Image: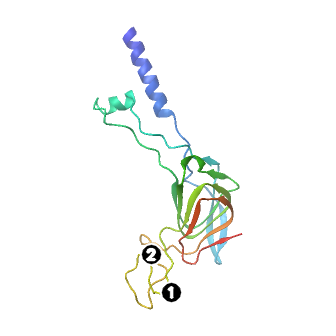
Amino acid sequence: MKKYLIAISCLSISAYAIAKERPSLEYNFPICGQSILNEKNITKVCATRDFTALEPRKRKRNWLAFLAAEGSGKYYGPIDRVGGILEFKNQELDMQGHVWDFSNQHNSDLELRTSNMQITNGVILNANIFLGGGYFSPNFNTKKQIGKSDEKVDFIYAQQYENESIENSFINKLYASPYHIYLRSWGGGILN
């Protein structure tokens, strides 16, 4: 009987450890209408909840991890991801007044890899906000651009990022208290 109780206790503790979920940034936004950007119709998607990022868990030994590594003691478990990466194309993300707070993660990045996109009506706190994935504006005096080896007069200003354009990305009617905002979008901007 004692052996059965120990086995049941171990299973209960294991199930609790697996079932206990930490809140995560929303990634699958529902479609909630249409919007217009640069005189083109785009799909509007909407955030459905607030998000408070938890402090990342530190790697530490525990007996379940020890068992998972067959007693080697070398498994320390995953470290939680900080910040987030969201990809949008021809969409408006309406945050519907929701708040995303990264205060507990200390200098995390929220990267919006975008093309023909705007993010509106929300609050983002304490993150480095990257609008656009990897575009760097050219230096017109030196005719150089980060990531480009060409030094021609007709070099391409709007470079491609992973085979996709990163044009026309906008922040509009968004309240933010970021550490930094990086605008890396050809033809993009920050409005209102």
User: Looking at the rendering, in which quadrant would you find the C terminus?
Assistant: bottom right
Please identify, in this view, whether the residue under mark 2 or under mark 1 is nearer the observer: 1
Vertical side of 45 occupied by 137: above or below: below
Tell me the amino acid under the disc marked 1.
Phe
Q: Secondary structure at mark 1?
A: loop
Circle 2: is it few (<14), some (14-19), or many (20+) Cα within 10 Å?
A: some
Separation of residues labelled 2 and 1 (CA atoms): 19 Å
Q: Quadrant of residue 181?
A: bottom right
Residue at left offset 41%, top offset 39%: 59
Residue 131 % position (x, y): 56, 66
Q: Which mark is residue 140?
A: 1
Residue 155 % position (x, y): 44, 86
Q: Which mark is residue 192?
A: none
User: Looking at the rendering, in which quadrant would you find the N terminus?
Assistant: top left
Residue at left offset 61%, top offset 48%: 51
Residue 50 % position (x, y): 65, 48
- Name the residue nearer the viewer: 126 or 20: 126
- Name the residue nearer the viewer: 188 or 104: 104
**Mark 2 lies on residue:** 160
Residue 77 % position (x, y): 39, 39
Circle 1: is it few (<14), some (14-19), or many (20+) Cα within 10 Å?
A: few
